[in-house]
Image (cartoon, helix red, strand yellow):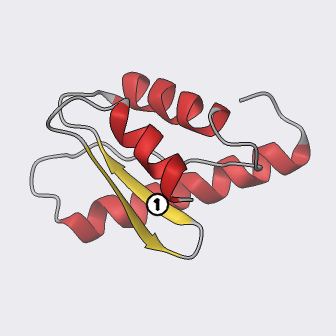
Amino acid sequence: MADLVAHWHAELDRAGFVGRLGGDEFVAVLPGHGEEAARRWAALACAWTPLPCSAGVAVHEPGDAARDLLVRADADLYADKHDRKAGAPA
């Protein structure tokens, strides 16, 4: 797992950050990325792992606390998991 995180981190620009939240959950902070760019990065990150992978994306909005972003990303993650399990295209 450390190799995977190192690979993800190598693909970020200098301001980016990847960290483990716990278990098999990770967070990537992608400054300067809009939603579309963040989704592309997440899709690539999932492609770099041999395991089934789902990703949730949240874009910072004025007044957001870190918790707000995590809550929205988590909801998006579960929607992605549902779509992946249902066989829907990403």
Give the residue at mark 1: 26
Q: Amino acid at mark 1?
A: Phe
In the displayed structure, 1 sits above or below 50; it is below
In the image: residue 85, left or right of residue 1: right
- Judged from the image, the secondary structure of the residue bearing numbered disc 1 is strand
In the displayed structure, 9 sits above or below 76; it is above
In the image: residue 34, left or right of residue 72: left
**Residue 1 placement: quadrant:** bottom right
Which residue is at the front of the view, 24 or 37?
24
Which residue is at the front of the view, 18 or 85?
18
Residue at 23%, 40% in the rendered image: 16
**Label 1: few (<14), some or many (≥20) within 10 Å?**
few
Exactly how many numbered labels are in the figure?
1
Spot occupied by residue 89 in the image (x, y as percentages of width and height): 79, 27
In the image: residue 21, left or right of residue 78: left
Spot occupied by residue 61 in the image (x, y as percentages of width and height): 19, 46
Spot occupied by residue 13 in the image (x, y as percentages of width and height): 23, 28
Spot occupied by residue 43 in the image (x, y as percentages of width and height): 58, 31
In the image: residue 72, left or right of residue 49: left
In the displayed structure, 76 sits above or below 26; it is above
Please state, as top left, top right, bottom left or bottom right, where the C terminus lies in the image: top right
Residue at 39%, 57% in the rendered image: 27
Which residue is at the front of the view, 32 or 58?
32
Residue at 51%, 36% in the rendered image: 42
Residue at the far front in the pictured view: 3
